[in-house]
Image: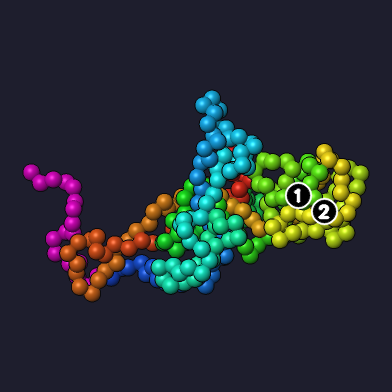
């Protein structure tokens, strides 16, 4: 009795001469020419989540700033000016926790009825495609450098000369780096950019006149670079076999990796963010 499983080609079908390859170098070229610049950081669970009952992070944690996750350089030891495996120059951000990559970004949903009601940015999600070597992971952070969006938040002023970028849930700082302040005010007063404060090189706000009293609640609206987190993998790993001019002894010799494809969402919309 012959087994029903199949482990090869049917009799009479020849493998030699057949070429149905996915040309990865062409996709790399598309990413290079059409991709958006992004700061990419890997994510890790913060050790401050040591509450056995709730598994909640410490809102005063100096590592994750209360978010429960911290981000780090995708490949430790890299610095600006290094070369990647293809000889291209590596660029690392000033904080030393992100690597500059290119990624093709498209809409995450394909339902045209949703587009009619809400537009393509429904739920703040995008599809991200990167080169094979940039293996995105769950909750990795992606900062889109060539785009801006508005963000509004409350700040509990602590009396310091600078409102720093603290991220997470800390109420005395900015969640994101400020690009352009639109309006900053308290209940009693509107503060003017250039007269009362200015944006510093780190994206925080420096006071030099009319500083509010300690404990004053401030409302700030400002523009930021959109920050996304990977929340699902459409293709967690992608591989293919590339035909050779000469048949190889094993499939392993024909194996090649394909571009990485994942879904990302604006980080403040991700559950637990």
Magenta stretch, main secondary structure class: loop
The answer to whether residue 25 of the structure is visible from this angle is: yes
Residue 265 versus residue 21 in the image, above or below: above
| Magenta-colored span | 1-18
Residue 234 placement (x, y as % from top left): 45, 51
**Residue annotated with mark 2:** 207
Determine contact: label 1, label 2, CB under 8 Å.
yes
Queried whether the magenta region covers residue 4, the answer comes back as yes
Mark 2 neighbour density, 10 Å: few (under 14) some (14–19) many (20 or more): some
Query: Would you say residue 114 is visible in this rendering?
Result: no
Q: Is residue 50 magenta?
A: no
Quadrant placement of the C terminus: top right
Q: CA distance from mark 1 to mark 2?
A: 8 Å
State the image coordinates of residue 150 (x, y, percent, origin top left). Answer: 73, 54
Camera-nearest residue between 150 and 80: 80
Q: Could you say whether the residue bearing mark 1 is in a helix, strand or loop?
A: strand
Q: Which residue is mark 1?
A: 163
Please name whichever residue, 181 or 19, is drawn nearer the observer in this view of the structure. 181
């Amino acid at each position: 009795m012959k087994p029903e499983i199949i482990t090869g080609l049917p009799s009479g079908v020849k493998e030699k001469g057949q070429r149905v390859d996915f040309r990865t170098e062409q996709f790399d070229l598309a990413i290079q020419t059409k991709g958006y610049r992004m700061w990419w950081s890997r994510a890790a669970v913060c050790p401050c989540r040591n509450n056995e009952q709730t598994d909640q992070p410490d809102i005063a944690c100096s590592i994750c700033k209360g978010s429960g996750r911290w981000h780090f350089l995708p490949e430790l030891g890299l610095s600006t000016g290094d070369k990647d495996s293809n000889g291209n120059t590596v660029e690392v951000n000033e904080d030393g926790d992100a690597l500059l990559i290119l990624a093709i970004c498209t809409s995450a949903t394909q339902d045209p009825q949703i587009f009619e009601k809400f537009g393509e940015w429904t739920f703040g999600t995008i599809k991200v495609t990167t080169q094979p070597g940039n293996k995105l992971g769950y909750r990795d952070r992606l900062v889109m450098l060539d785009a801006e969006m508005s963000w509004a938040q409350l700040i509990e002023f602590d009396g310091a000369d600078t409102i720093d970028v603290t991220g997470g849930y800390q109420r005395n700082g900015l969640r994101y780096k400020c690009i352009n302040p639109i309006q900053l005010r308290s209940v009693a007063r509107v503060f003017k950019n250039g007269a009362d404060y200015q944006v510093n090189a780190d994206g925080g706000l420096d006071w030099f006149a009319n500083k509010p009293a300690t404990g004053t609640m401030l409302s700030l609206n400002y523009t930021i670079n959109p920050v996304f987190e990977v929340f699902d993998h459409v293709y967690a790993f992608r591989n293919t076999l590339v035909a050779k001019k000469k048949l190889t002894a094993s499939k392993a010799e024909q194996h090649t990796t394909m571009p990485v494809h994942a879904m990302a969402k604006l980080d403040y919309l991700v559950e637990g963010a």
